[in-house]
Image: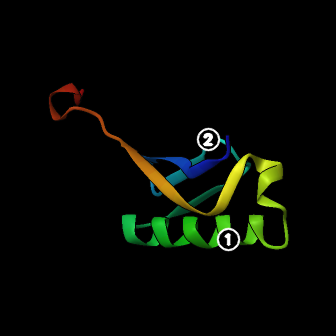
Amino acid sequence: MLQRTIKALVRKGKDYYIAECLEIAVVTQGKTLDETLSNLQEAVALHLEGENLADFGLAPNPTILVTMELEPSHAQA
C-alpha cells in the first residue's frame, strides 16, 4: 500500500530550526518556523521531481505531515 503522507520532524537547533523527513533523504533548515516549512516543501518537491513516487512507496500527490519536537519549559537548566 502506498503512503499518502511524507513524515517530517522539526526541531530547534542552536540558531536554526531543522526539518528532516523520516522516509526520504531530505533535510533542510530555516531561521523561523515559516521559513523552515517553506524550505521543507521546496526540498521535498525538488527531491521527488521527475521520480516515480511509487519507487519511494508514495501515492500520487502526497502531503507532508510535520511533527514538532519541543522541550518542556520546566526542563531548562
Would residue 69 be visible to someone looking at this image?
yes
- Counting every numbered tag in the picture gives 2
Q: Quadrant of the N terminus?
A: top right
Q: Secondary structure at mark 1?
A: helix
Q: Amino acid at mark 2?
A: Leu
Give the Cα distance between marks 1 and 2: 15 Å
Left of 67 or right of it: where is 27? right
Q: Amino acid at mark 1?
A: Ala
Which tag, 1 or 2, sits closer to the chain's start? 2
Q: Name, please, the residue furthest toward the left.
A: 74
Mark 1 crowdedness (10 Å alpha carbons): few <14, some 14-19, many ≥20:
few
Q: Name, please, the residue furthest toward the front.
A: 1
At x 77%, y 58%, the residue is: 53
**Would you name the residue on which mark 1 appears?**
45
Q: Which mark is residue 21?
A: none
Report the coloring of the rendering. Answer: rainbow
Q: Quadrant of the C terminus?
A: top left
| Nearest the eye: 20 or 65 | 65
**Would you name the residue on which mark 2 appears?**
22
Left of 66 or right of it: where is 41? right
Q: Secondary structure at mark 2?
A: loop
At x 66%, y 56%, the residue is: 59
At x 61%, y 41%, the residue is: 22
At x 79%, y 53%, the residue is: 54
In the rendered image, which quarter is residue 32 located in? bottom left
Would residue 12 be visible to someone looking at this image?
no
Residue 4 at x, y = what percent?
A: 57, 53
Mark 2 crowdedness (10 Å alpha carbons): few <14, some 14-19, many ≥20:
few
Residue 28 at x, y = what percent?
A: 61, 59
Residue 12 at x, y = what percent?
A: 41, 48
Do the residues under discs 1 and 2 have CB atoms within 8 angstroms?
no
